[in-house]
Image (cartoon, rainbow, N blue to C red):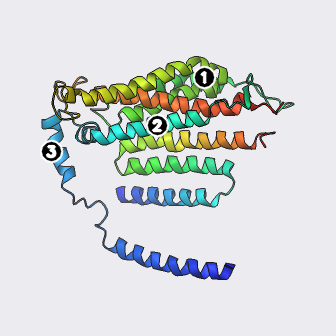
Amino acid sequence: MRMALEVLAFVLVAAAATGVVATRDPLPQSMAASLFGLLLSVLFMVLQAPDVALSEIVVGAVAYPLMVLLTVTKTTAKGAQ
Amino acid sequence: MNDSARRTLFFFFAAILAGALVAALRHLPSFGDYQGPYGDVILSGCIPQRHTPQGVAAVTFDYRGFDTLGEEFILFTAVAGVLLLLRQQQCERQEKPRDCELGRAIPATSSAVLAAGLLMFPAALLLGCSLVLHGHLTPGGGFQGGVLLATAFYFVYLSSDYRDLTRFTPDHLLDYLEVTGATTFALGATLPLVLNRPFMLNLLPLGKTGSLFSAGFLPLFNCSVGVEVGAGFLLLIAAFLKQVIVIRRESDQ
C-alpha cells in the first residue's frame, strides 16, 4: 500500500514537472507550476517529511506562481512597452 | 553551426550523460536504505541533550543553527533586493488602484468567497501561530509557520481587495517586524559569545521535554524566524502587487 502510494506520488510529480516544461506560455505555466508544487508537497508528505511539505505547499503552490502571475501581468499590461 | 551539426553534438553528449547517469544510479543504495551515522546519532541525542522530540528542529536551530542563521539572512537579503528593484522609479508615479480594463462588468465578490475568506483567515492565522509556537515539538517551525501566517493575509486580498490588504498589513509595520525577527535570531545566536562561550550555545534552561517552554533557544528562534519570514513574504507579495496595481510610468495615461 505504502509502496503503491510512493510510486503514484513519484509518477504524478514527474508528469507534472514534464507538464511545466512543456507549457511554453508563462501564464498557464504558472498554473502548471502551482499544480507541480502541490503534488511535490504530497510526495514530501508520503515520504514522511511534513516539515518540507508544509513549506512546499505555500512557497511552491502559492507564493512562487503568484509572483510569476503578477510579473506576467505587469510586463504584458497595456502601454508597458 | 547548422541545425544537424548542433543536433549531432547534442546527441553525442546526451549519450555520454545518459551512460554516466545509469552507471551512477546503479550504485545508489536502495530506496529508503539509510546508511549515514548522523541521523541515528541525532535521533538518539536530541531528547537527552536538547529536551526536544523534534530532531529536525534540533538540527536546524541548534546543532546546525549556524546554517539556518545564514539562510535566514539569504531570505532577508533576497527580500531587501526585491524591494530595492521594485521601488517606485523616478519615471514612475503612483496612482489610485483602478480597473484598467474598462467596459468589463466585474461581478461583486460572491458571498461564498467572502465567507470562505472570513473562515480561512483566522484558521490560517491560528494554524500559523501554532506551527511557529510548537516548532520544537511537532513538525513545522518558524519558516513553515511564517509562510502560513503570510498566507492568512492573502485570504483578505482574495475575499476583498487590495486596499483592505494594505490596511491590514501596513508596509512600515512589516519592515519593523522583519528586522525585529532577523535581529532577535542574530542577537540570540551571538549572546553566548558575549559570555565567552561558543557561538550559538543553547544557554536558556532546557525545561521539561514536550512542554511549550523547553529546548532552550529553540522556541525563541522559531518565533523570530516565523515573524521574519511572515513579514518578508508579505512585503514581497505587496511589492509585486503594488507594481501591478498602483505604479505606472509617467508616459502612460
Name the one closer to the observer, B70 or B21. B70
Residue B113 placement, left or right of A7: right
Disc 2 to disc 3: CB gap under 8 Å: no
Q: SS of the residue at dot 3?
A: helix
Q: Who's the residue at 49% across and 23% down the image?
A: B175
In this rendering, would A15 be left or right of B216?
right
Q: In this view, does B86 lie above or below A20?
A: above
Amino acid type at image mark 1: Ala
Same-chain check, marks 3 and 1: yes
Q: What residue type is labelled 3?
A: Ser
- The residue that appears at 22% across and 50% down in the rendered structure is B39
**Label 2 secondary element:** helix
What amino acid is at disc 2?
A: Thr
Label 1 packing within 10 angstroms: few (<14), some (14-19), many (20+)? few
The residue beneath circle 3 is B44
- The residues tagged by marks 2 and 3 sit, at their Cα atoms, a distance apart of 36 Å
